[in-house]
């Protein structure tokens, strides 16, 4: 695979992984119970906040390490679709003083979708753990 292409996917994987990890940690630090209450206020079950937080933390770490990139990225893409549709759509692309927009969620969605499609094997533990597949981009 083209080295520039792999470096680009590595950068996307690292930035997306760090971003989701930080967002997940903040959910737990700010009181996951509060987040669960907010989920309920927008019509989602409260336990979904715990599921989302865990996916963000564990998935963020996995992406940073390059483990299960395609699976984790698919989960992140689905989370972003849910966030846009359920929480951000009414605010519009850029949002308003009263409501956040969905521009960042859309950027995260597209980054996750790119990784779900292409994978990222450069500097990934996934490619180290399966050396026969080190040339594959789906580590």
Image (tube, helix red, strand yellow):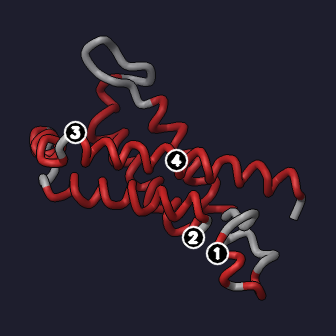
Give the quarter of the figure containing the C terminus: bottom right
> Quick check: marks 2 and 3 in contact, CB under 8 Å?
no
Dot 2 or dot 1: first in sequence order is 2
User: Where is mark 3, residue-wise?
Assistant: 30
Q: Who comes first in sequence, dot 2 or dot 3? A: 3
Q: Nearer the viewer, residue 15 or 105?
A: 15
Spatial separation of the CA atoms under disc 4 and disc 1: 18 Å
List the single residue furthest toward the front.
29
Judged left or right of residue 106, residue 128 is right
SS at circle 1:
helix
Q: Is residue 129 above or below residue 60?
A: below
Q: What is the spatial separation of the Cα atoms under label 3 and label 1, in whole angstroms?
A: 32 Å
Q: Distance between the residues labelled 2 and 1?
A: 5 Å
Is 64 left, or right, of 106 in this rendering? right
Please tell me whether mark 2 sits on a helix, a strand or a loop.
Answer: loop
> Which residue was labeled with disc 4?
18
For disc 1, the marked residue is 126
* Closest to the observer, 1 or 61: 61
Q: Name the residue under label 2.
A: 67
Residue at 32 percent across and 42 percent down: it is 26
Task: Find out whether the residues at labels 2 and 1 contact each other: C-beta distance under 8 Å.
Answer: yes
Mark 4 or mark 3: name the one nearer the start of the chain: 4
Where is residue 74? Give x, y as percent.
Answer: 49, 62
Give the secondary structure at mark 4. Answer: helix
Q: What secondary structure is marked by label 3? A: loop
Q: Distance between the residues labelled 4 and 3?
A: 18 Å
> Where in the figure is residue 3, as x and y percent of width and height?
88, 57
């Amino acid at each position: 695979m083209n080295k520039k292409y792999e470096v680009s996917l590595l950068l996307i994987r690292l930035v997306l992984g760090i971003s989701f990890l930080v967002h997940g940690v903040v959910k737990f630090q700010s009181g996951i119970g509060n987040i669960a209450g907010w989920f309920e206020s927008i019509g989602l079950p409260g336990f979904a906040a715990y599921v989302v937080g865990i996916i963000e933390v564990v998935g963020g770490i996995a992406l940073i390490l390059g483990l299960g990139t395609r699976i984790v990225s698919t989960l992140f893409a689905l989370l972003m679709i849910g966030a846009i549709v359920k929480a951000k759509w009414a605010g519009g692309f850029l949002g308003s003083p009263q409501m956040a927009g969905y521009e960042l969620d859309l950027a995260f969605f597209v980054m996750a979708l790119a990784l779900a499609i292409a994978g990222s094997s450069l500097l990934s533990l996934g490619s180290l753990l399966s050396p026969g597949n080190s040339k594959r981009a789906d580590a």
